[in-house]
Amino acid sequence: MELTVETRSKPPFHIIEVGGEIDVYTAPRLREAVVEAIDAGQRRLLIDIERVEFLDSTGLGVLVGALKRVRADDGTLDIVCTHERILKIFQITGLDKVFGLHTSVEAAVGADG
């Protein structure tokens, strides 16, 4: 399955919307989008994975790496996800305590204000 990556801005966040499957084959595309955003000066990232159907350990590694990179520049990385199957991965790994998890982009923006 192909991965779609779209970016947009909704202050205070730079949003990276992802769809499809994040796995060993497609994760580099997500990593590239995150690196481009950080290199462009974005420090408040919101990764919307609502349209993601599958997330493997490689994809999870990209998200953790992105978090480390943005935190190194005093930034934040939050995630939009409501899929129980994917949320379970965050819970099992303890990453639900590390990432800000939101039910929608609007909820994330509202939580910030």
Image (cartoon, rainbow, N blue to C red):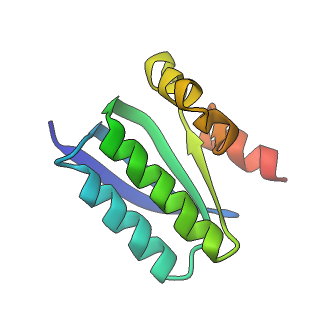
In the shown orientation, is residue 60 left or right of residue 79?
Answer: left
> Is residue 75 among the parts visible in the rendering?
yes
Residue 12 location (% of width, % of height) = 70, 64
Q: Residue at x 50, y 50 (%)?
A: 47
Tell me if residue 6 comes above or below residue 108 in the rendering.
below
Residue 72 location (% of width, % of height) = 62, 74
Tell me if residue 37 comes above or below residue 53 in the rendering.
below
Residue 22 location (% of width, % of height) = 29, 41
Outermost residue to the right: 113
Q: Quadrant of residue 28?
A: bottom left
Observer-nearest of 47 and 87: 87
In the shown orientation, is residue 79 left or right of residue 4?
Answer: right
Residue 18 location (% of width, % of height) = 37, 46
Observer-nearest of 24 and 22: 24
Position of the N terminus by quadrant:
top left
Q: Residue at x 69, y 37 (%)?
A: 97
In the shown orientation, is residue 29 left or right of residue 37?
Answer: left
Tell me if residue 42 comes above or below residue 108 in the rendering.
below
Outermost residue to the front: 93
In the shown orientation, is residue 86 left or right of residue 103?
Answer: left
Observer-nearest of 71 and 21: 71
Tell me if residue 69 comes above or below residue 17 in the rendering.
below
> Is residue 43 among the parts visible in the rendering?
no
The number of callouts visible is 0
Outermost residue to the top: 84
Observer-nearest of 4 and 25: 25
